[in-house]
Amino acid sequence: MSEVPVIELRGVHVIHTSRTGKLFRPDKVHAVNDVDLSISRGETLGIVGESGCGKSTTARVMVGLQEPTKGEVLFKGKPMRQNAASRKELGRAISVVFQDPATALNPRMVVRDVLTDPLKVHGIGDAASRLARVKELLDLVGLPQSALDVLPRQISGGQRQRVAIARALALEPDVIIADEPTSALDVSVRAQVLNLLTDLKARLGLGLVFISHDINTVRYISDRIAVMYLGQIVEERPTADIFADPHDDYTKMLLSAVPSLA
Ligand SMILES: Nc1ncnc2c1ncn2[C@@H]1O[C@H](COP(=O)(O)OP(=O)(O)OP(=O)(O)O)[C@@H](O)[C@H]1O
């Protein structure tokens, strides 16, 4: 892709200082170790690896929520500054969809308010144009207009994740970062949510970072896959190449695991 990536990580390290063990001895976890990654509009990057390999920490760096211990994070070619103006710009350009919509959505807010909230926070439109946008968002994610006045607990897990995706789309982001977005859903609706994300990416020209522990799910949706192991990217190549000819032993191990749509 010739355009400047929306997000670029160069030689990023994150060392968490945590307290572990019975003596609460301070410990350091090298969660992200020398990671280079980029994401542009119109492409899907999959990040795959087992629990604890550093996927979520990498996602937090990409969104600007986690400062790297070392290395550079570029936003549209410039250092991701931490001042208020750029935080707001970042918030518009990069959205996140989390694993569990039951906890990601405020249980006391009806869908209309969940979707209006980002528009209000960013001072976009008046009441009438915001409502029009909210209705358009429901259409985009395949929810009926009758969903406007329901609470998250009154709809299914798959529908809640559609609401979370609609909220992520509200500000017309360049990139959506989806961290295990199908893992908390019933198997029967996982494929629907994956199809929705693929469709939205194509229709809106978004960049999508799709994070999962399951290489088959990542395969289904990604143009490129970065395989993470113990904080490092052990290989990153087009999806078809990874499956046809995995280079790294860890990738081979992931591919030999039981196929599933987890
Ligand atoms: N805030 C933190 N303080 C201390 N250690 C942390 C913190 N966040 C993550 N870690 C540690 O960093 C490592 C990477 O965690 P991370 O959540 O990024 O991995 P992950 O691949 O997303 O795992 P999971 O899928 O289980 O969320 C783990 O060893 C984790 O325990």
Image (tube, grey):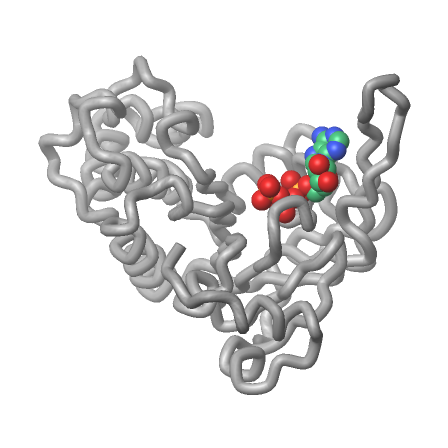
Within the image, what quadrant is residue 152 found in? Answer: top left
Left/right placement of residue 52 relative to residue 15 reads left
Quadrant of the frame with the C terminus: bottom left
Residue at x-position 81% and y-position 53%: 33
Residue 193 x/y as whole percent: 30, 52
- Which residue is at the front of the view, 3 or 31? 31
Left/right placement of residue 162 relative to residue 240 reads left
- Which residue is at the front of the view, 74 or 246? 246
Left/right placement of residue 139 relative to residue 122 reads left
- In the displayed structure, 104 sits above or below 247; it is above
Quadrant of the frame with the N terminus: bottom right
Residue 16 x/y as whole percent: 80, 35
Any part of residue 221 in sight: no
Left/right placement of residue 35 relative to residue 110 reads right
Residue at x-position 49% and y-position 58%: 214
Residue 13 x/y as whole percent: 82, 49
For ligand 1, give the image quadrant: top right
- In the displayed structure, 73 sits above or below 202; it is above
- Which residue is at the front of the view, 70 or 211? 211
- In the displayed structure, 44 sits above or below 66; it is below
Residue at x-position 33% and y-position 31%: 125
Any part of residue 229 in sight: yes
Residue at x-position 45% and y-position 66%: 258
Within the image, what quadrant is residue 81 found in? Answer: top right
Q: How many marks?
A: 0
Residue 254 x/y as whole percent: 57, 67
Which residue ends up furthest to the top in the rendered image? 108
